[in-house]
Amino acid sequence: MEPALFVHILGAMVLVGSLVLAAAALATGAGGSEPALRLGFRAILIGAIPGWIAMRAAAEWVASEQGLSSGEVPGWVDIGYMIADPGALLLIGAAVASRVALGRAGSGRASRLAVVLVAVSLVAYLVVIWAMTAKPV
């Protein structure tokens, strides 16, 4: 396996794993559990965001090595770009919402918003994983 693809897959695995941890922790912390909220916030900040950066940077590296950045690109690559780029905004929003929920221990709205943003991100990235593996278009 070439190094660019390895880094891309590793970054995606870290991203999705961190999102699963964050979703579980934030859903648990929505009732006001400060340790769970802290774990969810740290999972996003220390795991998901760096995983996204590694995944996205390596995706560009793979695209340049494979010649996918110019001309016609397969549909599954477009799906990856369409979901990964706005996904960064969802991650940042989830990090901000979880930090607000942590600052206001027991803030129900902020913690629920963080859970929703993480869940939407997770579902979107699972669609990308399906598209990258099945290559439907």
Image: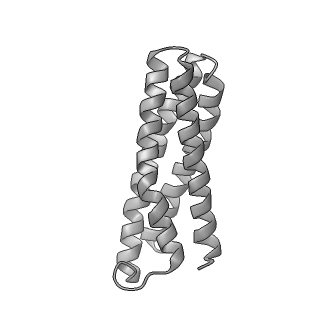
Seen at 61% across and 61% down, the residue is 127
Residue 119 occupies quadrant: top right
Q: Position of residue 107 (x, y in %)?
A: 53, 17
Seen at 43% across and 38% down, the residue is 93
Is 50 located above or below residue 68 in the figure?
above
Name of the residue lying farthest toward the bottom: 71
Foreground of the two, 70 or 54: 70
Which quadrant of the rendered structure holds the C terminus?
Answer: bottom right
Labels in figure, total: 0
Decide if residue 54 is in sight here.
Answer: yes
Q: How is the image coloured?
A: one colour
Foreground of the two, 38 or 114: 114
Residue 125 occupies quadrant: bottom right
Q: Position of residue 7 (x, y in %)?
A: 45, 62
Is 64 located above or below residue 105 in the figure?
below
Q: Position of residue 26 (x, y in %)?
A: 59, 30
Seen at 53% across and 33% down, the residue is 114
Is 47 located above or below residue 33 in the figure?
below
Q: Position of residue 64 (x, y in %)?
A: 35, 77
Decide if residue 45 is in sight here.
Answer: no
Question: In the picture provided, is 50 more to the left or to the right than 110?
Answer: left
Seen at 44% across and 81% down, the residue is 73
